Amino acid sequence: MSEPVYRILFEGERWFGSNADACLWALRRLGHAVLDLDFNILVPFWESFNLKVARRLLRFLMMDEHNQELLRLAREFKPHIFLAFKGAYILSDTIQAMRAQGIAAYNYYPDVSAFSHKAGWLPSTLRQYDCVFSTKSFLAADLEAQGYPVRHWEYLPHGYDPRAHHPVAVSAEDQVRYGADVAFIGGQTPAKERLLADLLELMPDLNLAVWGDRWQRTQSPALRACVRGRGIFGIEYMKAICASRIMLGLLSEKQPGSSVGDYVTSRSFNIPACGAFMLHERTEEILNYYDPGREIECFSSPEELADKIKYYLAHPETRRAVAQAGYRRCVPAYSHDGRMRALLEWHRRHSQT
């Protein structure tokens, strides 16, 4: 018996390499008819001071326009499913209106906390969905502890995107531009900054590259010298991963409203899918996906991190063997195609469509 084909209205960011875009294309590869709306079209991200002021003044008008557009698309497209990736700009009334039309409404929520965003209405909005799928195993308990229990909740971890996370050839020019002995790609947080600054105190001559937002604010002169600049995405992201000998899997710490910090993140799957060696913060959850010492490697302190870096830089054949085993474990098992297939299987079990 063939699986049903659904009409799916999808809301999320559409830039290449984003997790939302990965989910959208996974649904299309699975054969479903997907109509998408990127909130950045009607709620733009502006950088200059004057435009930021204008955005603040116009924010609720733009949000209302975005929600009205979602409802218009729902009336015309008549989807079986509405799926929001994070859904920070979606209002409760919009979800209720879709459910009243018989549309199953789901949210795939990727962040450590639902309470740390400027969108203060987000926790109450999450309560309106038929099910919240989350990459955080602790999200449902955190929401309930704050008085926002959701109707249904399912743990659905991050994955990799076959279009945006795969081994790529690295030229000599790429090696100079992107390569390093050790690299981290991701935004600055205080805990990540402390860890990398401690690492450089233990290994002051380490060839470390750091890519991502907000790293220019670091207080460590040694770490500031390692910052390559902006966040990188798409083909640049893959080249930086493949050009580096060791890629760090660092996790975000506890945020306002969350009980703990990350256990796994998108990098936990992106790096092995690119065929690279991953040195990941040790958590119980990462051990559900990989065998440390054989498919990835883990650390729990700056001292252990430094020791593991020294060992694997000195043993390239072992490092390459671990990277290859990590790739085989990750691909194709941990793709976004599998994550979306699991979400739709939940829908089939709990709905009439």
Image: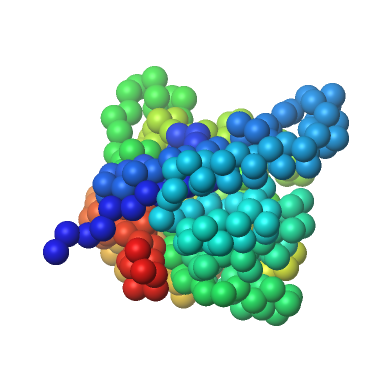
Kindly tell me whether residue 283 is visible in this rendering. Answer: no
Above or below for 222 versus 86: above
The quadrant in which residue 255 appears is bottom right
The residue lying toward the viewer, choosing from 324 and 182, is 324
Corner quadrant of residue 49 = top right
The front one of 224 and 333 is 333
Locate residue 52 relative to residue 42 in the image: left or right.
right
**Residue 278 versus residue 274: which sits nearer the camera?**
274
Residue 217 in the image: state x and y as whole percent: 75, 39
Image position, residue 79 (x, y; %) = 43, 50
Q: Quadrant of the C terminus?
A: bottom left
Which picture quadrant has residue 205? top right
Q: Is residue 345 left or right of residue 182?
A: left
Which residue is located at x 71 percent, y 42 percent? 63
* Residue 97 falls left or right of residue 60: left
Residue at the left extreme of this rendering = 1
Report x, y in % for residue 192.
Answer: 63, 54
| Residue at 14% across, 64% down | 1
Q: Where 1 sits versus 161, above or below?
A: below
Does the image show residue 141? yes
Task: Tell me which residue sits at (47%, 71%) in the image.
Answer: 154
145 up-or-down from 81: above or below: below
How many marks are shown on the rendered structure? 0
Residue at image location 28% in from the left, 53% down from the top: 5
As drawn, the residue found furthest toward the top would be 173
Residue 179 point in image, percent of width and height: 43, 33
Taking depth in this image into account, of 234 and 121 the one nearest to the observer is 121
- Display coloring: rainbow
